[in-house]
Amino acid sequence: MQEKHDGGARPAPEVAVHVPPRSMWSDGLGRTATRSAQLLLALALAVVVIYGLLQVRLLLIPFLIALILAAAVSPVVGLLRSWGWSAALATATAFLGILAVLGGVVTGIVFAVRSESDELVRSANEGWLQLQEFIANFPLPVSQQQIDEALASVVDFLTSAAAGRSALSGLSTAAEIITGAVLMAVILFFFLKDGPRIWGFLLSWFPAARRPKLEEAGSRAVDVLGSYVRGTATVAAVDAFFIGLALFILQVPLALPLSVLIFIGGFIPIVGATVAGILATLVALVANGPVAALVVVAVVIVVQQLEGNFLQPVVMGRSVSLHSLVILLALTAGTILGGIIGAVLAVPVTAVSWVVIQVLSGRASGEQPVPVRQHR
């Protein structure tokens, strides 16, 4: 018998679709865990690198100081060579000149402090007595006995074996400072003499396609370092001159050491000038009374306002285009890792790192960043 057909379309056979099992790393939690593991790995690598650099800080700090000074002085070498001077003579002149300036500043600090050391001790004693009296009369419950006990604990520490070990550590630190200064001078000489050759040698290890970007990054970094050092030195000198002039007019003791300290503090943005101004105010308060201290405060505020609003933008331009929060974070990290030297080096190193990142990412040349593709 023949089968009857109703003329309708035969339904298509069902095809089994194989769905792969869902991985535990493909959902939101898995992607978050992957990113977290990558972040932890990057942080661990950064910690290892920082720890390794801290172990060779006797080499790293002189190297960075020499690099910054070479970037600041290299235009002088180029100018002398454009006048027909030989490379050796131009390098030697710039090298001896910068050593003379640094040596003069250090010698001035030492002699200024030594010449007024008695006055410094007397002012310190008077300041300590006034501080004790202020604390004793303060509304908080702090008695004279508690102050004496705290002072006695400090004296006990200074006469203990720990203080002896600290003294030996101080001798070791002095030896490290001398070694670092000599090493810095040697590195600075070779940077001034063979800087372009050293940079060319380093570039030769990279592929030819990458060299233009790296060369531009190096050139921008040297410009930023040089502008930063020259601009900061100019601003710090102006601050030290006018504030020191006010201290001399008011006949504040230790005016010369305080002026030098203000100049050095100018190399630590935001914090350094403020701390130096507070110290000058305290010395004026102890030695000359509250009226002189208020005058010093007014002079410090006026000078810093003029510096921040007029002088610094003209002298430094946009050589360090960093936000104030970034500068504060860099100063904190530099102080933790390297003390005062770390605080001085933190801002220029951060500025150079930011410029290099901008150049390598294409943002410095006006290139638009690649838009992030949104997932639907």
Image (cartoon, rainbow, N blue to C red):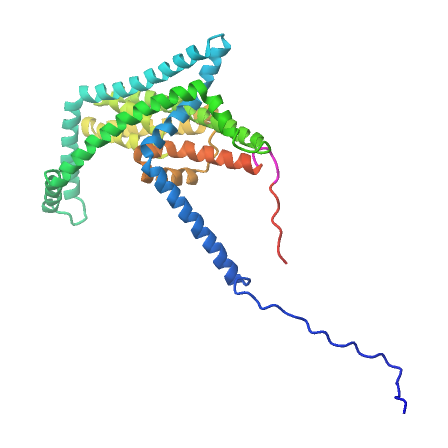
Which residue is at 42% across, 48% downward?
Answer: 43
Q: Where is residue 339 in the image (x, y as percent from the top left)?
A: 30, 36
Q: Position of residue 291 (x, y in %)?
A: 24, 28
Q: Can residue 168 be seen in this view?
A: yes
Where does the C terminus fall, quadrant-wise? bottom right
Q: Say which of 20 and 266 sits in front.
A: 20
Farthest front residue in view: 1
Residues in magenta, as a range: 363-368
Q: Does the magenta stretch include residue 290?
A: no
Where does the N terminus fall, quadrant-wise? bottom right
Quadrant of res 137: top left
Total marks shown come to: 0
Looking at the picture, does residue 6 appear above or below residue 232?
below
Q: Say which of 258 and 306 sits in front.
A: 258
Which residue is at 42% across, 31% downward?
Answer: 348
223 horizontally vs 234: left or right? right
Which residue is at 39% across, 12% downward?
Answer: 93
Farthest bottom residue in view: 1
Q: Where is residue 61 in the image (x, y as percent from the top left)?
A: 35, 31
Looking at the picture, does residue 42 appear above or below residue 237?
below
Q: Where is residue 111 in the image (x, y as percent from the top left)?
A: 22, 19
Q: Say which of 340 and 61 sits in front.
A: 61
